[in-house]
Image (cartoon, grey):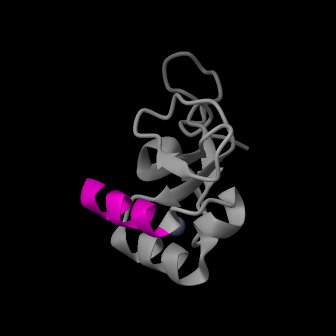
Amino acid sequence: MLPRDQETGKRVNSMAHIPLRMCIACREMKPLPALIRVVAAKGSDTAELDIHKKKFGRGAYMCANADCIKKAEKKRCLERHLKCSNASELYRQAEELL
Ligand SMILES: [Zn+2]
């Protein structure tokens, strides 16, 4: 049972409207603002960081922290998820965003 809002008496769930996505490195569900989105470029074997999270296409998410980026690099998560040839470049770019 969820707690009720003091004023309205309605049940509240503060997490309800925050979309969650799974980090490809730690496989935890995280709210979008805590993640970096990477999207596969259409018609090529490369991918790019989607900083505004608005690009269409096959995407993958990593936590915006150095641990998860390093872990993803080690496990070749982007390579496996997006089948992209420029993943090593993307890990560098993601680290620069932190
Ligand atoms: Zn993570």
Q: Quadrant of residue 94?
A: bottom left
Vertically, is 70 above or below 28? below
Q: Which residues are magenta?
A: 88-97
Q: In which quadrant will I find the C terminus?
A: bottom left
Name the one closer to the observer, 80 or 64: 80
Farthest residue, direction top:
8
Q: Is residue 96 left or right of residue 58?
A: left
Give the prevailing secondary structure in the magenta stretch. helix
Q: In which quadrant will I find the N terminus?
A: top right
Name the one closer to the observer, 79 or 33: 79
Farthest residue, direction bottom:
74
Q: Residue 22 in magenta?
A: no
Q: Residue 96 in magenta?
A: yes
Q: Position of residue 56 (x, y in %)?
A: 63, 30
**Residue at point 60% right, 81% down?**
75
Q: Quadrant of residue 24?
A: bottom right
**Residue at point 43% right, 43% down?**
33
